[in-house]
Each structure stands twice: as structure tokens, then as C-alpha cells.
Image (cartoon, rainbow, N blue to C red):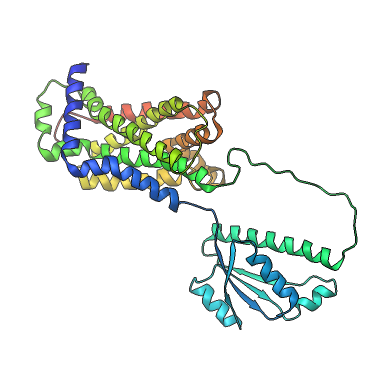
């Protein structure tokens, strides 16, 4: 293996990449824009719940319940309704997230010391958000019940209680950006490295320079390595940029070793660049390569645990996730960012990345032949 030939191929690849202004935007501007967009859009935090209130009671007790919701600063009563048709119309058009219906005998039942029903209707078209809204609603109603009991029965009652002292480690405020932003770092690196390398060999064929490379003494392994090194350097540079954005812009703490994170990134890139090169060897045109890349990215994303926990998937699907390098890299990135763990904890994920990277990259080298067909 001649490192001189590899060096010249790497230099040619950099010149070819930087010559096109559009490539410069994709390489340097696109990752930062995507990081900012994904960082704000992918968010499960609920800060605003629009409510429609149908109050048939119109009493002191019903107004206290309405005030309990508006006092939480999350619920905002946007509409005070007169009948159930208005409630259905607002939910159907998506103008409110939930509706609260208070019956006409609400106050009388409470004054008798009995349980008064209140109907909560939540928009369940987005099940995750609906479950969170219902959970917030129940917490407000529980607090209202405790306040009402103290008001109706002001006597001092002593009884044994359980006092839960809850502490959330690694994400004290339960901010969803702490969970999603490190995952976005991993996803962007996979997306860009796959897209760039999937068209690397096709570009040589379409530009007519593949014939010149075929007649040179460069070996297939040297060609693949020379094609890969520029994208490794670029991907690591992009990763450094998005990590800086995550730390300085989104205030995500980096608790662990950045050196270990870059080592994991190199193992991860071995897999993604190998997949990209494999796509490049089996595709005939750049359009075909890009379509194949997007076809592969979606299963990688869905089976990675980025949004949906792997333990909730069917068992056969959980076995399929073992062939997904993004699954291992997400655990590493989140572990290093939020928990500060090291290799003694993350070694199974590093081993998985190393095995997958070796298999995929060696397969790409074996698949590539110095010929035009």
C-alpha cells in the first residue's frame, strides 16, 4: 500500500469538493442550520396548553377550578363556551388542545362532601402530547382537591404520610433538549457522511475521471481509503462545530471526555462511510445513490432509539437494531454528554461500533472493483 498515492488522492478529493460553491454550503453552513432547527423543533416540553371551558355551574367553586388551571401558567383558557357543539367544533379544528366541561350540579355535590365529576376532553391525535397534557391536568385537579378539603374541613388532622423526595439525575429540570440535542449531533453526522460518500465514486464516473484512475497503479483499497479520509476529516470538523453549538447555544453540559467522544465518532464514521461507499459502488447515477441513501436513513433513524425506546419495540425488531450503528452511538453520545461515563461503562457500545465498522468497511472495499461496469 502506497501512502503517497493515497495522499495525492486525498488532495484531489479536497480540491474537487471545495471547487463547487454549493458543496461549501452543504459542508459548513448546512450542519449548523440543521442543528439550530432540529434543536428547537424536536421538543416534547409543554409550555402552553390552550383550553376551552364549558361551565354549566357558574358558581364560586367552578370559578376556583378555572382559576386553578390559569394559575399554573401552562394552561390558557382561550374560549368560554355556551354549549357542547362549540366545544366539538374547536377540538375538530385544532384551535384548542383540550376542553373542560363542568356540570350544573358541580358546586352542590362538593358542598355535600361528595365527589363531583368534571369531564376533560383532550385532543388525542398526537398521543404523546395528549398524555402529557392529561398528566398536567390531573396534577392541577389534585391540588384543587387538597385546597378544597382544607377549606371545607379546616380542623387540624394528624396522620402518617409518605413524603417523597424526588431528585432527577443528569437532567434536573427534565428539559427535553438535554435528551434530543446530543441525539441530533449523532444524527447529523450520520446524515452528512452518508450523503457525501454515497455519491463519491458515482461522481468520478459521471465526471469521466474514473477512466483515468483505472489506468493508474492505485489499488482498490488505496482508492477507498483515499476517498474516505477527506470525509472523515470533514465529518469530524462538522461534529466539532455542532458540539460547540450544543454546548454554547443550547447550554447542554458536556460532562465526559471529548477525546473519548471523538474516538467513538471515528468508529461510528467507519460504519456510516462504509455504508455510503457501498451505496456508491452499487448505484449507477447520483440520483439513484441519493434515493438509496434516504431509503436507508429512515430505518436507521427509527430503529436507533432516538425518539422511540428500543425496549418498547417487538422483540424481533429489537434484534434488528443490533445491526444499526446509530443505536450504539446514541448511547455513547448521551452517556458522555449527560452522565460523564467512560469506557468502563460504554465498552459494549464501542465493541458494537468496532465490529459493525470493520464488517461494513471491509465489505465496501471487497465490493469495489476498478472498472466502469
Left or right of 34? Residue 93 is right
x and y, in percent, of residue 181 in the image: 46, 43
Give the residue displayed 17% in from the left and 20% down from the top.
Answer: 5
Q: Is residue 242 visible?
A: yes
Residue 281 coordinates in the image, percent (x, y):
23, 36
Q: Is residue 168 left or right of residue 335?
A: right
Q: Along the horizontal axis of the image, is 179 left or right of 266?
A: right
- Residue at (36, 32) in percent of width and height: 269
Q: Nearer the viewer, residue 88 or 295?
A: 88
Residue 157 in the image, given as x and y percentages of width and height: 90, 57
> Foreground residue, 48 or 20?
48
Residue 285 showing in the rendered view: no
Residue 78 rendering spot, x and y as whole percentages: 55, 72
Above or below, comparing residue 327 to residue 149 in the picture: above
Picture quarter with the N terminus: top left
Residue 301: quarter of image: top left
Q: In the rendered view of the protein, which quadrant contains the C terminus?
A: top left
The image quarter containing residue 245 is: top left
Q: Residue at x 23, y 26 (%)?
A: 226
Judged left or right of residue 240, residue 227 is: left
Q: Is residue 276 above or below residue 51?
A: above
**Count of marks placed on residues:** 0
Amino acid at each position: 500500500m502506497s501512502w503517497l498515492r493515497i495522499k495525492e488522492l486525498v488532495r484531489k478529493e479536497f480540491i474537487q469538493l471545495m471547487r463547487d460553491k454549493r458543496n461549501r454550503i452543504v459542508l459548513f453552513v448546512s450542519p449548523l442550520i440543521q442543528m439550530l432547527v432540529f434543536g428547537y423543533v424536536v421538543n416534547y416540553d409543554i409550555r402552553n396548553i390552550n383550553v376551552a371551558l364549558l361551565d354549566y355551574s357558574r358558581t364560586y367553586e367552578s370559578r376556583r377550578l378555572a382559576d386553578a388551571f390559569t394559575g399554573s401558567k401552562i394552561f390558557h383558557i382561550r374560549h368560554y363556551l355556551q354549549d357542547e357543539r362549540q366545544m366539538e367544533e374547536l377540538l375538530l379544528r385544532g384551535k384548542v388542545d383540550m376542553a373542560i366541561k363542568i356540570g350544573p350540579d358541580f358546586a352542590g355535590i362538593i358542598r355535600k362532601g361528595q365527589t363531583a365529576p368534571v369531564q376533560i376532553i383532550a385532543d388525542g391525535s398526537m398521543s404523546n402530547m395528549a398524555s402529557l397534557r392529561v398528566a398536567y391536568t390531573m396534577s392541577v385537579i389534585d391540588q384543587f382537591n387538597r385546597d378544597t378539603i382544607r377549606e371545607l374541613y379546616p380542623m387540624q388532622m394528624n396522620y402518617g404520610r409518605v413524603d417523597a423526595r424526588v431528585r432527577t439525575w443528569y437532567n434536573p429540570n427534565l428539559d427535553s433538549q438535554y435528551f434530543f440535542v446530543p441525539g441530533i449531533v449523532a444524527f447529523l453526522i450520520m446524515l452528512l457522511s452518508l450523503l457525501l460518500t454515497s455519491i463519491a465514486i458515482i461522481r468520478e464516473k459521471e465526471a469521466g475521471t474514473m477512466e483515468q484512475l483505472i489506468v493508474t497503479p492505485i489499488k482498490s483499497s488505496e482508492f477507498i481509503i483515499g476517498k474516505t479520509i477527506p470525509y472523515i476529516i470533514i465529518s469530524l470538523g462538522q461534529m466539532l462545530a455542532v458540539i460547540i453549538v450544543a454546548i454554547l447555544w443550547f447550554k447542554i453540559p458536556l460532562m465526559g471526555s471529548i477525546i473519548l467522544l471523538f474516538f467513538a465518532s471515528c468508529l461510528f464514521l467507519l460504519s456510516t462511510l462504509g455504508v455510503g461507499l457501498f451505496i456508491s459502488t452499487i448505484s449507477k447515477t447520483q440520483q439513484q445513490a441519493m434515493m438509496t441513501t434516504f431509503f436507508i436513513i429512515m430505518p436507521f433513524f427509527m430503529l436507533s432509539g432516538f425518539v422511540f425506546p428500543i425496549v418498547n419495540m417487538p422483540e424481533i425488531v429489537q434484534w434488528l437494531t443490533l445491526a444499526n450503528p446509530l443505536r450504539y452511538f446514541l448511547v455513547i453520545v448521551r452517556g458522555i454528554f449527560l452522565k460523564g461515563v467512560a469506557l468502563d461503562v460504554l465498552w459494549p457500545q464501542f465493541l458494537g461500533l468496532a465490529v459493525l465498522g470493520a464488517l461494513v468497511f471491509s465489505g465496501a472495499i471487497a465490493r469495489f472493483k476498478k472498472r466502469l461496469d
